[in-house]
Image (cartoon, grey):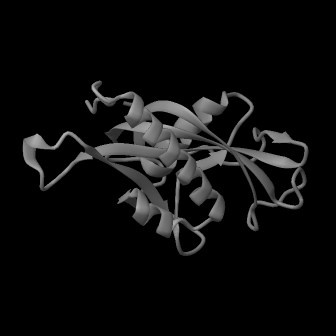
Amino acid sequence: MAELVARTGRHQQRYENGYRLIAGCVPFRYKDGDDCGDSCSEKIVEVLMINSSSGPGLLFPKGGWENDETVEQAAVREAIEEAGVRGDLMDFLGYYEFRSKTLQDEFSPEGLCKAAMFALFVKEELEAWPEQSTRNRSWLAVPEALGSCRHAWMRDALQCFTKWHEGLLMSARGEDLPNQE
């Protein structure tokens, strides 16, 4: 298998109306209830967060959406590069605007960013990934993740994920949830 390498630089970045366009995801999996054995039909959802390289708090994988890819491809790429996970995009969670103090440039001097966020059902955790030397992965229950988010906009995306997931569970009663392979 070819070695995975993170993309760097800004020459391929997308901008729109002074905003740097970002793609990211809320990676999730199901954890079987530890204390309810085979009789437990409810599955506990966990989300994957990574440490920030610029301060305290945890993040969801996200990064610049580049000119040679769709927003979905960018979200999947960022999950691989930053968190070392692969899976299926399940739903679009929305756009979230924020200001980056560290990512100001000639196209977005104010550091304005607009992130397209998706729910990503994780099917594979890679043993090696491009940013493993600077990123630690943490699987968290949603309430713990809400308290750990470094940025308010990521809490908003997680709350949107929770509403989507509750709807998924309600419509899936009697049907199987996505399978982990």
Residue pushed farthest bottom? 56
The answer to whether residue 133 is seen in the rendering is: no
Q: Nearer the viewer, residue 131 or 85?
A: 85
Residue pushed farthest top? 175
The answer to whether residue 152 is seen in the rendering is: yes
Q: Position of residue 142 (x, y in %)?
A: 42, 57
Q: Position of residue 28 (x, y in %)?
A: 40, 45
- Judged left or right of residue 47, residue 57 is right
- The residue at 87%/61% (across/down) is 110
- The residue at 83%/48% (across/down) is 19
Image height of 84 relative to 154, above or below: above
- Judged left or right of residue 115, residue 110 is right
Q: Position of residue 74 (x, y in %)?
A: 61, 36
- The residue at 53%/52% (across/down) is 158
Q: Position of residue 52 (x, y in %)?
A: 54, 66
Q: Nearer the viewer, residue 157 or 6?
A: 157
Numbered disc total: 0
Q: Which quarter of the rendered picture does the N terminus lie within?
A: top left
Q: Nearer the viewer, residue 166 or 82?
A: 166
